[in-house]
Image (spheres, rainbow, N blue to C red):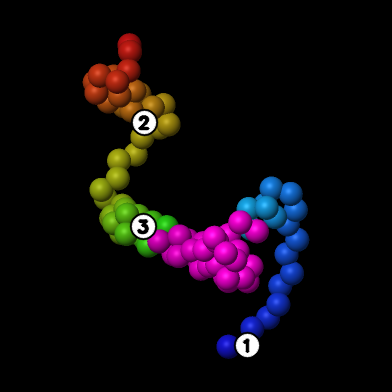
Amino acid sequence: MASESINVKVTGELREYVARQIGPGGEYESTSEFVRDLIRRHKQDADDEMTWLKTHLAPLVETPDSEFVRASAGEIARRARKRYLKSGKGRA
């Protein structure tokens, strides 16, 4: 895969932070290595979030319509409030 240069300008506090991460005493040998690692971590976080969403939402999406009950927004709010008060976390 061919590499491509991307220029990024950082100033002030961010520039100082990057400088502390590079070279002796830092975790990275170069700014490029640092940025590549940040991008990899961000991508992994995004992938993990998507996996979590698919895992936890797929069963809901696959639930047949017959499992759902028609209710108004007011009815849903009333039921939620009743459940909340019953849990002991709320006040009447």
Q: Are marks 2 and 3 in contact (CB under 8 Å)?
A: no
- What distance separates the C-alpha of mark 1 from that of mark 3? 32 Å
Amino acid at pointer 2: Ile
Mark 1 or 3: in front is: 1
The label number, if any, that marks residue 2 in the structure image: 1
Tell me if mark 3 has few (under 14), some (14-19) or many (20+) residues whose alpha carbon lies within 10 angstroms of its own. few
Q: Which residue is mark 3?
A: 52
Instruction: Name the one closer to the observer, 38 or 56.
Output: 38
Mark nearer the N terminus (1 vs 3): 1
Residue 14 left/right relative to 47: right
For label 1, the SS is loop
Instruction: Name the one closer to the observer, 88 or 74.
Output: 88
Q: Is residue 70 magenta?
A: no
- What distance separates the C-alpha of mark 2 from that of mark 1? 55 Å
The residue positioned 64% from the left and 83% from the top of the image is 3
Q: How far across and down, in percent of the image, does residue 13 sit?
A: 69, 48
Q: Is residue 37 magenta?
A: yes
- Residue segment shown in magenta: 19-48
Amino acid at pointer 3: Trp
- Where is residue 77, by image quadrant? top left
The residue positioned 68% from the left and 81% from the top of the image is 4
Residue 32 left/right relative to 42: right
Mark nearer the N terminus (2 vs 3): 3
Q: Are marks 1 and 3 in contact (CB under 8 Å)?
A: no
Locate the C terminus by quadrant. top left
Specify whether residue 56 is in view: yes
Q: Which residue is mark 2?
A: 76
Q: How far across and down, in percent of the image, does residue 26 sit?
A: 55, 61
Amino acid at pointer 1: Ala
Name the residue at the front extreme. 24
Q: How far across and down, in percent of the image, does residue 39 sit?
A: 55, 66
